[in-house]
Image (cartoon, rainbow, N blue to C red):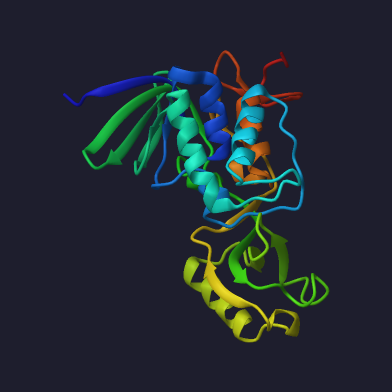
């Protein structure tokens, strides 16, 4: 007979939102992460924003202070994305969160009022029964047909400063400044339906024929993940099973606090702040 593990809340994706939710729930939460990194929807997609965000929760403030202390961000909100990873790992360790890396979700389905999730890791297949499922991945790996992408970018890191800001080619790209001077991210828009090969081909063609303001810059590398945008911050797959893409938010601390503030109703329906999904009253 196959061994079955039971958890109260299963969070898919060690995203910023997923880590925020896990930090609030604590030991009753299990986080499943398909990759070998955390916060990848920001870090590995080179997702930067010029929107400053001031955390409000005690946990968010503590995380923000640690980022400032390690010089990963500054008072203006500029981020050195690679430096976020060790801070998040330290946060996971300090909070004693149950985060399982390089674990793929093979299947998720309802089972007697709960949810059975089949996962695959280095030890083989595992069967986990959860009272609630919260999928925070950009691709909604538990129900891929629910994923609807509003916009998608393949970002690249540049060395050097462009001669002009966003005055040319605005429809094709935008520029964002990281924590340090030679840390410029070019955000290149691709079609939401583009696969990895098509998106890279378009990016390389753009760079070979780049506009004059970018001629003084060098191409360092491109992102490992797409920078995604979504129309909705939440989609209920069924009561107790929700998709909340962390990449909906433009600032990682904002995504973290949205997860931390998330409350789950008596049947697992998610609601956050003044927004409620499902048929339950706002608490």
Residue 282 can be seen in this image:
yes
Q: Left or right: where does residue 77 sit relative to residue 238?
A: right
Q: Left or right: where does residue 235 sit relative to residue 273?
A: left
Q: Left or right: where does residue 183 sit relative to residue 137?
A: right
Residue 172 lies in quadrant: bottom right
Q: As drawn, which residue projects farthest toward the right?
A: 167
Q: Left or right: where does residue 135 sit relative to residue 107?
A: right
Q: x, y percentage for residue 216?
A: 68, 82
Q: Return the residue nearer the eye: 173 or 181.
A: 181
Q: x, y percentage for residue 117?
A: 36, 32
Residue 281 lies in quadrant: top right
Residue 204 lies in quadrant: bottom right
> What is the count of numbered marks?
0
Q: x, y percentage for residue 150?
A: 67, 54
Residue 91, relative to residue 76: is it above or below? Answer: above
Q: x, y percentage for residue 49?
A: 71, 52
Residue 14 can be seen in this image:
no
Residue found at x 53% / y 25%: 23
Q: Quadrant of the N terminus?
A: top left
Residue 126, relative to residue 29: is it above or below? Answer: below
Q: Return the residue nearer the eye: 7 or 185.
A: 185
Residue found at x 47% / y 42%: 86
Residue found at x 83% / y 74%: 167
Q: Quadrant of the C terminus?
A: top right
Q: As drawn, which residue projects farthest toward the left?
A: 1
């Amino acid at each position: 007979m196959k061994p079955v593990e039971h958890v109260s809340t299963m969070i898919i994706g060690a995203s910023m939102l997923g880590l925020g939710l896990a930090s609030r729930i604590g030991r009753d939460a299990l986080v499943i992460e398909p990759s070998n990194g955390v916060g990848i929807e920001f870090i590995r997609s080179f997702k930067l924003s010029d929107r400053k965000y001031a955390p409000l929760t005690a946990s968010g403030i503590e995380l923000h202070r640690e980022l400032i202390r390690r010089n990963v961000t500054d008072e203006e909100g500029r981020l050195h994305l690679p430096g976020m990873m060790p801070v998040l790992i330290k946060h996971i360790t300090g909070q004693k969160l149950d985060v399982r890396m390089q674990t793929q979700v093979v299947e998720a389905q309802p089972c007697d009022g709960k949810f059975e999730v089949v996962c695959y890791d280095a030890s083989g297949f595992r069967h986990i029964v959860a009272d609630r499922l919260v999928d925070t991945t950009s691709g909604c790996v538990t129900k891929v047909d629910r994923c609807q992408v509003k916009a998608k970018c393949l970002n690249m890191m540049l060395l050097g400063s462009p001669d002009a800001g966003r005055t040319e080619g605005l429809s094709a790209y935008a520029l964002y400044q990281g924590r340090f001077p030679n840390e410029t991210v070019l955000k290149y828009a691709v079609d939401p339906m583009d696969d990895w090969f098509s998106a890279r081909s378009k990016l390389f063609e753009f760079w070979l024929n780049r506009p004059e303001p970018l001629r003084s810059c060098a191409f360092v590398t491109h992102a490992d993940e797409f920078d995604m945008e979504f129309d909705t911050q939440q989609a209920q797959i069924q009561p107790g099973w929700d998709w909340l893409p962390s990449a909906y938010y433009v600032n990682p601390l904002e995504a973290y606090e949205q997860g931390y503030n998330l409350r789950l109703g008596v049947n697992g329906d998610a609601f956050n702040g003044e927004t409620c999904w499902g048929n339950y009253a706002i608490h």
